[in-house]
Image (cartoon, grey):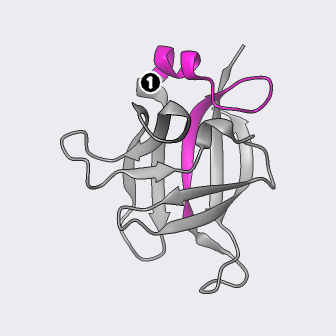
Amino acid sequence: MAQLQRIMILLARSHEFPNGSVHHGYELVAPLNGAGKIDLEAWKANREKCTVRRFWADEDEQQGFLRHRQGGPGGATWIFDYDATVSDDDEAGFRLGDHVWAPGEYVSIKDEDEVMHTFRVASVDPA
């Protein structure tokens, strides 16, 4: 049975940040199944509890929701949605439903400017 987990992901090493960055990342709440993957059916039952907080150095924090949309690789895309009335603020994950969300694993998120960033899962704890 999937349980809601609080997941912290931090910017991984990159050209701009050779050591990664604890000041750039996301904290999200998502239901993970026993294999550590996002559980779509549990998300449907808990979608308003599935939140995301974006923190990016000196920029204002953004609060939003983890959303599932049709289309994209595999027939669906997980996004971070900060304003339901517009779509240009959405940030899409690269195959987030296929990833194991465990400390040390990596995920990629495309920001609102269409720039892909790689993040390392820093922690996964019960929400």
Callout 1 amino acid = Arg
Q: Residue at x 26, y 45 (%)?
A: 83
Identify whether 4 is placed above or below 95. above
Q: What is the number of callouts on the image?
A: 1
Q: Quadrant of residue 61?
A: bottom left
Q: Quadrant of residue 1?
A: top right
Farthest residue, direction left: 85
* Residue 32 belongs to magenta span: yes
Quadrant position of the C terminus in the picture: top right
* 2 displayed left or right of 62: right
Mark 1, residues whose alpha carbon is within 10 Å: few (<14), some, or many (≥20)?
some
State the image coordinates of residue 51 (x, y, percent, origin top left): 46, 38
> For this rendering, which residue is in front, 112 or 77?
77
Q: Residue at x 35, y 51 (%)?
A: 90
Q: Residue at x 48, y 75 (%)?
A: 57
Q: Quadrant of residue 100?
A: top right
* 116 displayed left or right of 125: left
* Residue 119 belongs to magenta span: no
Identify whether 33 is placed above or below 91. above
Identify whether 92 is placed above or below 3. below
Q: Which residue is mark 1?
A: 47
State the image coordinates of residue 12 (x, y, percent, origin top left): 68, 69
State the image coordinates of residue 97 (x, y, percent, origin top left): 61, 36
Please state the extent of the stretch shown in magenta in the rendering: 25-46
State the image coordinates of residue 98 (x, y, percent, origin top left): 67, 38
Q: Secondary structure at mark 1?
A: helix
